[in-house]
Amino acid sequence: MRMHLAARPVRSILRGIADAAERWRDGDFSPRVRALERICARTGYSMPVAEYALNRLFAALNAADLQATVERELGSIDVLDGFVSRTSMSRERALPAGRVCVISSRTTIGVALVPALFALIAKCDVVVKDREDSLIAAFFSTLYEELDEFRSAAVGEHWTGSERELGEFDVVVAFGHDATIASIAAALTPRTRLIPFGTRASVGYVARDALSALQDAQEVARGAARDLVLYETEGCLSLHALFVEDRGTITPDAFAEILARQVERANAEFPLAGRAPQIVARVAAARDLAAFRAAGGRGRVHSDTAATFLIDTTTSHEPPAFLPRAIGVRSVGSPEEAAAYCKQHRLPIEAVAIAGMRDDLADLAIELGAARIARFGELQAPLAAGRHGGRPRIAEFVRWMTDER
């Protein structure tokens, strides 16, 4: 008879997860190689893009960061194994929340793995509705080799899109568009806790003090280019809008030109694997419209004949294009103007990339309700310990029992 995770010390569970992640950091690890090919086939991303995603994902799943997250949110890792005194009057224990289902994202590679692993650390039984590349199921197979107890606690199965069976779970974590989240929520019973991660966007803000020297501007643009091109600008951590302050040594138009050159370099580092004809047509149409506005004296446009990217300074009040490797660079006088734009277009903000050292830049992120502030170039590299969507990592997978005797 197989043992359940409940019988395992949580430190042993955590170590098993970290050891499995360490094996997946090896680019020659056979399960990773096979998964990489399937990821590219499913997403249409090129091999370097998928490699980058897996490198970032598994580097973040180290034992130190995982344990620090548990301790920050629960007070002590030991509360998952037994009662721990918090005061002289009572002791507390964090019990598993129950059966957990995680529904994978269509776009973001491996995003479902992090909540699934924290649910396992909380000693929950976890089912992940996996995508066609079976990345989660492949990683779970490595977990089974680390601890046999994972076999009965961690299951990865193909997601068919049916919500009918979700009501049997105690917790459902769902990634997807807002319409998908609403459909899932409607299928759940009142007893099931929904942890939704719906449609969100990320933006960047370049302050004029970051544009005083060409070298500094190039460094910011290099990071912004990476944030833009990775994952075809599809995820919530992609750079969807960029605000550049005017009255700096380097103007917003000049910065856009620097950014365009850096995007060309990023395209070489993270090349396109291919695009559907309708996507190519949409980017080309956006480029041609921007060129028409530029011909009338309204900003500039940077692109290429194949429309592989688009940097557009002709936009002002228009909403973000939400097209792959395409962005509008908007000249602003202050963070307040950027905040007004985001509110006008009702952009739900996940993260803000900032270049500059002023206090009002952090205030911008707070006003927009962002869950994270990052440097340019690091939007797409969140820590596993970070609060994705502003939510805790493990606290929602436990229920508390208090002994007041």
Image (spheres, rainbow, N blue to C red):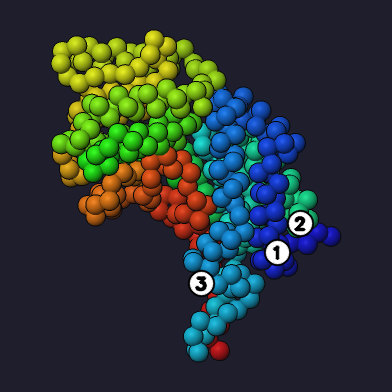
Q: Quadrant of the C terminus?
A: bottom right
- Tell me the residue that label 3 is attached to: 75
Q: Earlier in the sequence, mark 3 or mark 2?
A: 3
Depth order, front residue of 398/307: 307
**Cα distance between the residues tagged 1 and 2:** 9 Å
Q: Which of these two is toward me, 251 or 183?
A: 251
C-alpha span from label 3 to label 2:
26 Å
The reply to whether residue 250 is in sight is: yes
Looking at the rendered structure, the secondary structure element under dot 2 is loop
Can I make out residue 184 in this image?
no
Would you call the spot at circle 3 few (<14 residues within 10 Å), some (14-19), or many (20 or more)? few
* Residue at left offset 56%, top offset 25%: 46
Q: Quadrant of the N terminus?
A: bottom right
Q: Amino acid at mark 1?
A: Ser
Q: Which mark identifies residue 324?
A: none
Q: Quadrant of residue 111?
A: top right
Left or right of 254 on screen, residue 306: right
Residue 352 locus on image (x, y percent): 34, 44
Task: Give how far apart the Cα atoms at labels 3 and 1 are.
Answer: 18 Å
Which residue matches tag 2?
A: 147
Label 3 is placed on what type of residue?
Answer: Gly
Marks 1 & 2, CB-CB < 8 Å contact: yes
Task: Name the residue rendered at 26%, 16% in the picture.
Answer: 290
The kind of residue tagged 2 is Leu
Could you say whether the residue bearing mark 1 is in a helix, strand or loop? Answer: helix
